[in-house]
Amino acid sequence: MRFLRSAGTAFAVALVFHVGLILALGHYRHPTLWENGMIAAYLDAGKGFSGDFSIPGEATSWQAPGYPYLLVAAWKLLGHGVLSYLAISLLQAVAVSSIVFPVGWMTRRWFGAEAAVLSRWLVCAMPLYAWYATRLHHTAFVMALHPWLLWGWLSLAEKPGCGKALSVGIGSGVGALFQPLILVLLGPVALWKLGGGLIGRNGSRAVCLLLAGMATVLALTPWTIRNGRVHHRLVFVKDSFGKEFWLGNNPHATGTAFVEGGAGEITNVYPPRAMQWRGTMPEADLMKAMQNEAVDYCRAEPKAFVLRTVKKIVWFWTMTPARFERSVVGGEALSFRWVQGLYWGVFLGLGGVAFLAVRPWPREYGGVLLLAVVFYSVVYGLIHVGQARFRGEIEYLFLPAVAAGLRWAWSRWRSSSGLSSCRETPRM
């Protein structure tokens, strides 16, 4: 039994499962690399971080730089082919399997040791972690970095240290270079904990948290300077907000990036007016033109904008109607729709049980969860929903509550069966 309670055992089982799935599905043999692959090809050809969103081969910030540079590094070391993609897939398997450690630690912090054991095994069974370990996309690394970094900020506030502060800060900056939205949650959590340090006059904690924040900014600064030089404006990591905002706010908007039936992206089927300048207008200008076009549409129909935003938020936290999800290039959102609906329904049910039954509810956990719900609702309410990876990046936050709810339900069943009695006692 002690063997099953070990975090190392859960990691090993998760790793074997994820590697086995990578080999079984074989996506690394003929991967879809999306925009990351296009940018990596330009880098590999010595043409810089470039893309084709507007002017072919122009300097781009369409995607964050982390994954394209990883692709190029693999190509340089292992060549263009199966070996490179397999190596990256195996790294992704290690990354998503490692989530058992920070999720276990945070669950123990909030709900105790028994719930922590369950949370690790829940990580092993997470369908999205298994699926994205097999895809050649930045999502797997983002899903793994998120819980590690959140745990780092929380532990830094509890036990300050300059070395830890630099590690957490640099790690957050590097994470943002794979997905800048990672800071949407980490930033507010850091400010919350920093504010607590200042109010409580805990000098060492405040200094370390400030140091970590500065390290985050410094890690991002070289790329932000590069973007300023090529786009002649302030672009921290990516310049694609205009396109994403237009996708969610235009006369043909469905709430996702796709038209009804999922056979095409809205920008391709019903191009925005700004696309008339494609090929002559620089990327950053075209993105801004699309944003302005969407803003004008929202201003013209404010009630429709509010209703559309609320609809997208509801879909983000439940499920998008099947007719608006991608049906091409694999169409996995439709093929595995039942899996997503099943596990997410169970998650919400058990999380609700924990919220109602486990007392006292950990205030820190409640605060983190509330920040995630509010900020991610705002972001995806403004743009578009419909891809499992969007919510999947923060689904780890629900695992502690799911584990606590499962623990409570199991204890109640054992008690009613006369096997034993157990009362859940959170630590915080």
Image: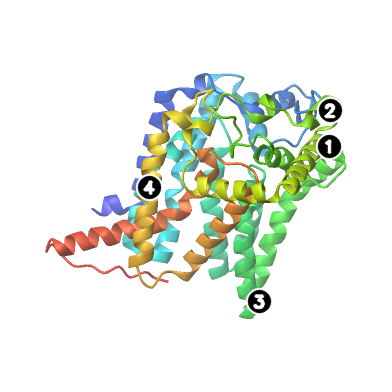
Q: Which amino acid type is shown beneath numbered disc 1? A: Asp
Q: Residue 399: horizontal and vertical position, in percent? A: 41, 53
Residue 61 position within the rendered picture, expressed as x and y whole percent measured from the top left? 75, 37
> N-terminal of the two: label 4 or label 3?
3
Dots 3, 2 in contact, CB < 8 A: no
The residue at the far left in this view is 418
Determine whether the residue tagged by mark 1 lies in a helix, strand or loop. helix
Mark 3 and mark 2 lie on one chain; the one further toward the N terminus is: 3
Q: CA distance from mark 3 to mark 2?
A: 50 Å
Q: Could you tell me if the residues under marks 4 and 2 are in contact, i.e. CB atoms within 8 Å?
A: no
The residue that disc 3 covers is: 198
Q: Name the residue that disc number 4 marks.
A: 345
For marks 4 and 1 on the same chain, the one whose residue lies earlier in the sequence: 1
Tell me the kind of residue under disc 3.
Leu
SS at badge 2: helix
Q: CA distance from mark 3 to mark 1?
A: 41 Å
Q: CA distance from mark 4 to mark 1?
A: 42 Å
Please state which of residues 191 and 412 is positioned toward the viewer in this rendering: 412
Q: Residues within 10 Å of mark 4 (few under 14, many from 20)?
A: some
- Residue for badge 2: 277
Please give the label number shown on residue 241: none
